[in-house]
Image (cartoon, rainbow, N blue to C red):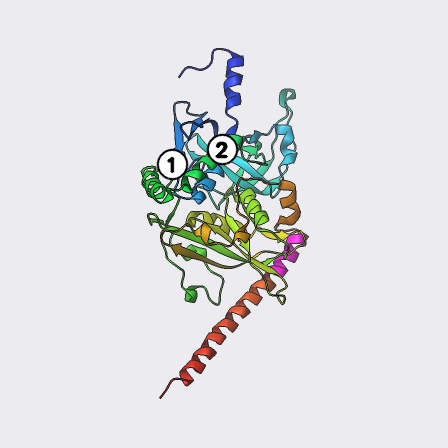
Amino acid sequence: MNGPGTKAESEDLWSRYDLEYRAYEDDAWYDVYVVLDATAEKLTVKYWSSPAYEIVFTAVEFATEAQVDDLAGRFRPVSVKLEDNECWMLSIGTTVCAAHAIGDDLYRFYDAVIEAVKRQAHSFADGEEKCLCNFVLFWKNGRGRGTLTSANIARICITEPATQLDPRISAFTIMAKKKITSSDSIFTRKKDSELSQNRSLEMDTIMTQKSLMLESEAVSGKMCNYNAWPSQDEDLGSSCYTEFILICNLENDLTPSSIKDFIYKQTSILPQAFVFPRPLSDPFARGAIMVDSQKKVQIIYEFLENPNHIVVSSRGRPWVIAEKASVWTFGANIWNLIPMTLDEIKCIRIDARRIDEELQVVISGTESYNRAKQLKDLLVEYIHHESQLCKRLVLEEQKIWQSCQPA
């Protein structure tokens, strides 16, 4: 494909590539040009890096609203390349989009969090400023997910906050969800499931799981070790299989939408979430984060349990994971089984200022982190004690029932 003949034509073509798309096949971010065909009800995604390559999504190919929301969460504004004199914008805890090597002179862009910064005096050779600082990155997705590497500013971009969903993506999600909830939804879902299986490279992380409900014996009395879970997913057809993380020590006035927005901002995964009603005797609220694959729940879990930081409320209350488990339901959409208080998302709207005011990430080595660590350890001890009391209750109940049995 030949390039445009003039600089003006080149700039006009580039301006069309106004979104980033996180591909299903490798989780990398790509600059894309999106075309919505409302008549045919399809969305075409064209890659800047490979103009001849494009992906077409049709409104009828989605089996659940969770699949539609997952696709919508894979688009955002194009990240901004930093100049050498803008390295001051990069600080510990900043989420960035950076280049990660996947081969000889071959890179892909993935999300990462800055874990450490080593400031260096800039050079000014030939009157041109050059940043010599070094940044330690914790990778949130891609091949290096969960690892630390170092990078210079040339490989780092600042992510743009998605304050609202792009109109083209929003219109397409409405089309797709109407297909799911139409009067002939039973036939449509069966057909969509078959179409989704044909997109093996594009939808292989959707609706695929392995285990059934985690037995209570495996989680009682201790915090779960996620690494013990099977890593491979198995297709369950039209069944719905949901992973969730139970969170303790939430603020009483925290809303489900705030949890969802915060997790999306930190991990690029759009979950479902809700906050449970609490007894008056409880000093804190409890809630749950829910996603539709083990891969997603693992990413969220690794973010929440990263020893280099702690998630806290604006009042300093640290989050504590109480349990991780799975729910399996056959032939039903799990989201329809959750109470209406779930505050379902109709379109993604993130108020970054509100999120920062309600929830924060405190970094290891700071006074806020040390205080949060003490409080978190106290809560972990409390949860363990609570678990032991529950086990004792079960044993005492069994004794009573056994004593009532006829000889």
Q: Residues within 10 Å of mark 1 (few under 14, many from 20)?
A: many
Q: Residues within 10 Å of mark 2 (few under 14, many from 20)?
A: some
Q: Secondary structure at mark 1?
A: helix
> From this viewpoint, which residue is outermost toward the front?
183
- Amino acid bearing label 2: Ala
Q: Give the residue pinned by disc 2.
A: 171
Measured in 3D between alpha carbons, the distance from the residue under mark 1 to the one under mark 2, in whole angstroms, is 14 Å
Q: Residue 134, labelled with which disc?
A: none
Give the residue drawn at x 65%, y 29%: 85
- Magenta-highlighted residues: 368-376
Please determine whether, in this image, residue 243 is positioned above or below residue 27: below
Task: List x then y, in percent, for residue 388.
Answer: 51, 71
Give the camera-side residue of 247 and 193. 193
Quadrant placement of the N terminus: top left
| Residue 258: percent from left, percent from top | 59, 48
Q: Amino acid at mark 1?
A: Val
What label does residue 60 carry, if any?
1
Q: Quadrant of residue 40?
A: top left
Dominant SS type (magenta): helix
Q: Does residue 374 belong to the magenta stretch?
A: yes
* Coordinates of residue 39 in the picture (x, y in percent): 42, 27
User: Which of 10/167 is in front?
Assistant: 167
